[in-house]
Amino acid sequence: MLNDSYVAGFFDGEGSVVIIVVRVKKHGRIYYQFRPLLKMSQKYRPVLDSIRSYLGTCSVTGNALNGYRYVIQSVEHIIKVADRLLQWSLVKRDSLRVVRRFCEFQQSKVRKNTPYSRQEIETMIALRDELLNLNEMTREKQLKRIVYTPERILGETSFVDDYQRWNEERLSKLTYAAKQYWTSRKVIKGVI
C-alpha cells in the first residue's frame, strides 16, 4: 500500500527536481521561459503507474528499452506534490523547498503570458542556480549543460519593466494588423 513516506523515499532515490530554461524568439525579441519539473524514472512501469494513481497527477511516458518517466510540469501540481513529500523526504527536501518557492513565485505573477521584468528574471535565475547547487550528485553534468548563463539571459532578454507601455505597443501593432487585413479583404471584394 502506497503512502507519502514511500513515495518520498522513492523520489529521493529515483527522482529529480529541475528548472529548465528555454530560449524563445518571438516577434523579433528574445524571451526566456523557466519551467519547473519533478521527474521520477524507472525501468519497471507499474511502480510509476501506482505512484501516478496515488498522487493523481500527470502521466507516465517512455518505453521498456529506455525506461519510463513520470514527469510533473504543472506549477499547481508541483506545489501539491512537494507539500506531500516535504515532510518525508530526506535527500531532496531542500530541492523540493526551492522548486516550491519557484512555483509560488510564478503563481504570484499577475500578468500571465507576458515577458518578465528584469527583477523577475533575476529572481528566477537565483532560484534555478540555488537548485543546481543542491543537485550535487549530477552537478558537474548540469553545469556543463548550462547554455543559458545568467549573463546571457540578462543580456538577451527583452524586459517588460513598463507593462502599460508594452501592452499599448502590442495593441497598436494588433490594431494595425487588423486594419491591414480588413483593407485587403475589401480590395478583394471590390468594396474600395
Image: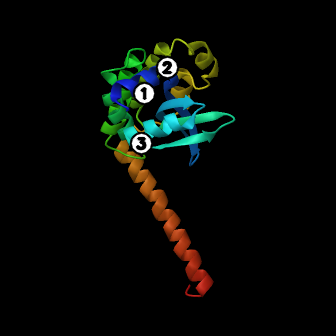
The CA span between labels 2 and 1 is 26 Å
Q: Who comes first in sequence, dot 1 or dot 3?
A: 3
Q: Which residue is mark 3?
A: 53
Residue 154 screen position, x and y as percent? 51, 27
| Real-space Cα separation, disc 1 to disc 3, in angstroms | 31 Å
Residue at horizontal 40%, vertical 34%?
117
Name the quarter where the C terminus is drawn: bottom right
Q: Residue 191, how many percent across, how many down? A: 55, 87
Residue 13's disc is 2
Q: Residue 95 versus residue 162: which sits nearer the camera?
A: 95
Tell me the SS state at disc 1: helix
Q: Can residue 73 be seen by looking at this rendering?
A: no
The dot on residue 62 is: none
Residue beneath the point at 53% across and 28% down: 153
Other residues around mark 3 within 10 Å, as few (<14) / some (14–19) / many (≥20): few
The crowding category of the residue bearing disc 1, from other C-alpha atoms within 10 Å (few below 14, some 14 to 19, many at least 20), is: many
Asked whether the residues under the numbered discs 1 and 3 touch, taking CB atoms below 8 Å apart as contact, a structural biologist would say no
* Up-down relation of residue 132 to residue 20 (above or below): above
Residue type at the position of mark 2: Gly
Q: Earlier in the sequence, mark 2 or mark 1?
A: 2
- Structural distance between the alpha carbons of marks 3 and 2: 19 Å
In the figure, is residue 42 to the left or right of 73? right
Residue displayed at 50% across by 35% down: 48
- Return the residue at label 1: 124
